[in-house]
Image: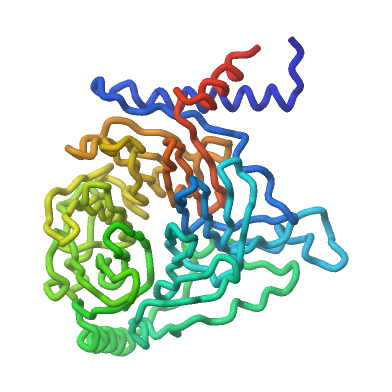
Amino acid sequence: MTTTPRIAGLLASLAAAIFAVTFAGIEARAQAVPNYIFDPTWPNPYPNNWKIGGVTGLAVDANDNVWVLNRPNDLTAIELHAEHSPPLALCCVRSPSMIHLDRDGNVIGSFDAPQGHGMDVDSEGFVYIGQDTVRKYDPGTGEVVAEVARTPERENGAPVGLRPPPDRAPGEGGVGAVYRFLPQSRGPGPDAAALAMREEARAAFRETYPPETPMIVGGLEEIRIIEADNEMYVADNYLGGRVLVFDLDTFEFKRGWGAYGKPLADISTDDADHEYTPNGPMPPEFVGHLTLNVSNDGFVYAADRNANRIHVTTKEGEFLDEFVIAPGTGVGGSTGGVAFSPDPEQQFLYISDLTNNRIWFLDRATGELVGEMGNMGENGGQFFGLHMIAVDSEGNIYTGEVFAGERVQRFVPADSPKGRLLQQLAEMD
């Protein structure tokens, strides 16, 4: 059999990806941990010469189609040569911020909403995007049809409200997604008087908007629509993170809680209570970058990424358990997005890890780590800024990356028809 260089490269990638995925299950203690195969055939090339930015939202709808929220403003000038008139090169142009893909990886819709963080979609196709609050969008027109109330000001003084996108001069990009996370050479910091003024302003803001404020106060990290209860769960990043629940029809506030299920009013406003040292004791409050998801049997899993942990509560906020993953992880933490295995019992939690570039598989009943998948790299099946995770009804895993990744990938169950086919291809000489 003759193999072209392109096919040979594909087969080599598949073989490496299969080893990386299945190796993780060796110490799974005989539990039926699913094995996954990287699918290099998904998605198909984007139309219109699009290049996407970092993925900040990912959701699978009732038809197993995939919604991808990305940050096209992450792109740099070197990625946008085709926007010039005439084009300076064959590639590329900014994509819309919201892209709708079918299960075959084809773009079936899009609109260019202001960028955000966290999103979900309901059974009617309305899209909910976390911006400075939660906004509900008509996917056909890209227009806002409803939004959750938020405070008229921010703790850091930044503006509030929908703002027009920055002036996107053709071919002129920004500094890129990684730049702001790199150490910067800076001059002398603020003097003692300036620091004192800053602390006074922060204390005044927190007095004006105490932890129990029944609206969005900070920025948005995650949104989950639970139509069976006609509710929307929101992770507001104020004070390290607050779980807030709103009525899905009226967007009225219903309830909320903090770490260990404590009432909102009991959340500490002392920053020291929201700090975590790798391998140190668990802090009494959420530390930061809180995401969440809700299981079919009614439990809420809130992942406090910067503290490397997941808190399990009831839908009313009663604390049940704490799962800790890779506690020595610093920088950005280990517990990112939360997804569930597709079986009716949702036996496993799938946790995306931005810092270690892993997917952790946990037994949902015990929190025991039973497997892992992935490593840092730029090849297909690897991750470089693993940020978002979602699972469809057939058990396919979808991932979204930020930093230098800026892509979505799919992993299929090894025992699925597609998985078996990919394994057969990998075994070909």
Quadrant, the C terminus? top right
In this view, which residue lies farthest toward the right?
86
Numbered disc total = 0
| Relative side of 140 to 389, left or right | right
Quarter of the figure with the N terminus:
top right
User: Which residue is located at x 68 percent, y 62 percent?
Assistant: 94
Vertical comparison of 392 with 414: above or below: below
Q: Nearer the viewer, residue 94 or 111?
A: 111
* x and y, in percent, of residue 376 in the image: 48, 40
Which quadrant of the structure image shows residue 347? top left
Q: Is residue 81 left or right of residue 217?
A: right
- In the image: residue 86, left or right of residue 131: right
**Rendered residue at 44%/51% (across/down):** 388
From the viewer's perspective, is residue 71 above or below residue 395?
below
The residue lying at 29 percent from left, 88 percent from top is 201
Depth check, front residue: 119 or 117? 119
Tell me how the rendering is colored.
rainbow
Quarter where residue 9 is shown? top right
Nearer to me, 103 or 373 = 103
Location of residue 427 in the rendering, given as x and y in whole percent from the top left corner? 58, 14
Residue 275 sits above or below residue 427 on the image: below
Q: List the single residue furthest toward the top.
A: 1
The residue depicted at 36 percent of the width and 33 percent of the height is 372
Q: Is residue 324 visible?
A: yes
Image coords of residue 428 (percent x, y): 63, 13
Residue 306 at least partly seen: no
Residue 247 versus residue 352 in the image, above or below = below
- Residue 405 in picture, x, y percent from top left: 55, 49
